[in-house]
Amino acid sequence: MSVSRQKSYKIIYDVKYNGKYSNILLLNELNDFSSKDRAFITYITYGVLSKINRLDYIIKKYSNIAFSKISKQARVILEIAIFEIVYMNSTVDYATVNEAVKLAQKNDNRAKSFVNAVLRKIAADVPNDEYIYKELKSKDFKSFITTYYSIGDFVFERLQNNYSSEFIIKLMDSMDNTPNIYIRRNNLKIDNENFLKEISYINSDFEIVGKEHTILKYKTFDRVAKNDLFEKGYYSVQDLGSTKAVLALDPCAGGEVLDLCAAPGGKSIFAAQLMNNKGKVISHDISRAKLNLLDKEAKRLGIDIINTSENDATVYNEDYENKFDRVICDVPCSGIGVMRRKPEIRYKDNSDINDLIKAQYKILENAARYTKNGCILVYSTCTLGREENQDIISRFLSENPKFELIMENEFYPFIDDSDGFYICNMRKHS
Ligand SMILES: C[S@@+](CC[C@H](N)C(=O)[O-])C[C@H]1O[C@@H](n2cnc3c(N)ncnc32)[C@H](O)[C@@H]1O
């Protein structure tokens, strides 16, 4: 049995049934694999996790036992094999079936002949994705979207409350694509010309998308955070949405920035770089463990103006009243905008959404009190929909007339080539 398939199986199983996070498992558990195997495992893991409902629809069509009676192990094994047969054209079907049977033998021996029988039928028929699309499109809109694009009720309802059917289809099509990788030069360590020269030796397949800060776009970059230039601190990996939130904050050298939900640190770090490592960035987060990542990143990049400490941003701190030139609250959110990177978000339920929205509002209210008169406050999320974005801001502006909206914008993968993201910046008047 292929070790790569067993690894993919284990990661997908842990994400589906043990509440683990795919991006963390993929980051930490593939170090002993070759670059080819890492690419294979990553492709299968993301592919399956972002298509579970669609793959299960195919299982239901070909299985002669009820879906509810199929063991968790057998479901994952079938999902992987069907993904390979239907969505990875290069694979030889009979080899995939044999591999799946071996996976069953190891992980759920009783399901071996069932897995074999279902996959032989599928391999003989090879259901075509276009056909599945047409079949599902003929059903009601909710069944079509939740099954074909593989999302749960919460995400579907959020999208339906906010966007037209046509927009939802475009958005979900783009959520099926692999996100581009963006890297940004560290201005504190290397200039533009030398950076472009050095990075080209490692991977020259980039497009320059931001000249001023040398932001490069890659389709693929194996071990983007594990090479000599990265170790030397010459660049950071950061999505465009995240970069734009910091540009909207507009931090200045010598100023004082407060980042209330800072970890793992992308925005605090870019702020410190825009400030030329002069001034102060106070970075809080509720998780000390995640702030440790920020400290490590700052050290790698040669930044020493960031001060991290564990703090609950929903709790008001009177010492901070009217104290900061720039305040950013990149609040915890439902994360719908980043489902390409964290496919488990597709199946989120809504059990904690009301508490989340209350916390977002409370954090924003506190952030507003910490902002000096005449200065800038940024509110951002990596989710989509007015409930956690525009509604929060319109309520805030109506209750806080001292604040004037400068800009608010929602970003989408198919329009902006970034993660789904929301950014709003406001100025506090005296
Ligand atoms: C969207 S992430 C922030 C990402 C970060 N700004 C960056 O650019 O890397 C939201 C963060 O809020 C933190 N968080 C959640 N509840 C919080 C609270 N009550 N107070 C402070 N931080 C909180 C989470 O630990 C998480 O790190």
Image (spheres, rainbow, N blue to C red):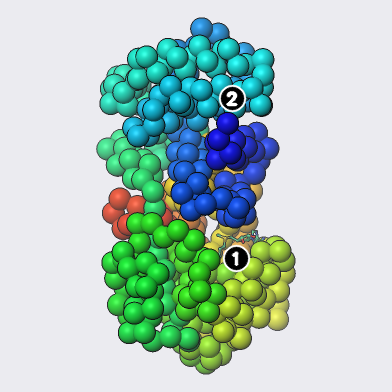
Residue 330, percent across and down?
A: 53, 64
Above or below, comparing residue 386 to residue 208 in the picture: above
Q: Is residue 113 found left or right of 375 in the rendered image?
A: right
Q: What is the secondary structure assignment of the residue under circle 1?
A: loop
Q: In this view, does 406 lie above or below 1?
A: below
Percent position of residue 167, x then y: 30, 42
**Image: 383 above or below 173:** below
Closest to the camera, between mark 2 and mark 1, is: 2
The mark that comes first in sequence, 2 or 1, is 2
The answer to which quarter of the image holds residue 417 is bottom left
Decide: is 68 above or below 429: above
Crowd class of label 2 (few under 14; some 14 to 19; many from 20; radius 10 Å) = many
Q: Quadrant of residue 139?
A: top left
Residue, x 61% and y 80% (percent of image)?
299
Tell me if the residue at label 2 has its CB under 8 Å from ligand 1. Answer: no
Front one among 24 and 361: 24
Q: Mark 2 points at which residue?
A: 102
Q: x and y percent of residue 77 in the render? A: 55, 26
Ligand 1 found in image quarter = bottom right
Query: Could you tell me the amino acid type at mark 2?
Result: Lys
- Image location of residue 429, percent across then percent down: 46, 80
Kind of residue at disc 1: Pro
Q: In this view, does 234 lie to the left or right of 23?
A: left
Q: Is the residue marked by circle 1 packed among few (<14), some (14-19), or many (20+) residues within 10 Å? A: many
> Residue drawn at (41%, 60%), measured in percent from left and top?
221
> From the image, which quarter does the N terminus lie in?
top right
Residue 15 or residue 41, whichever sits in front: 41
Residue where numbered disc 1 is placed: 264
Residue behind label 1 places its C-beta within 8 angstroms of ligand 1: yes
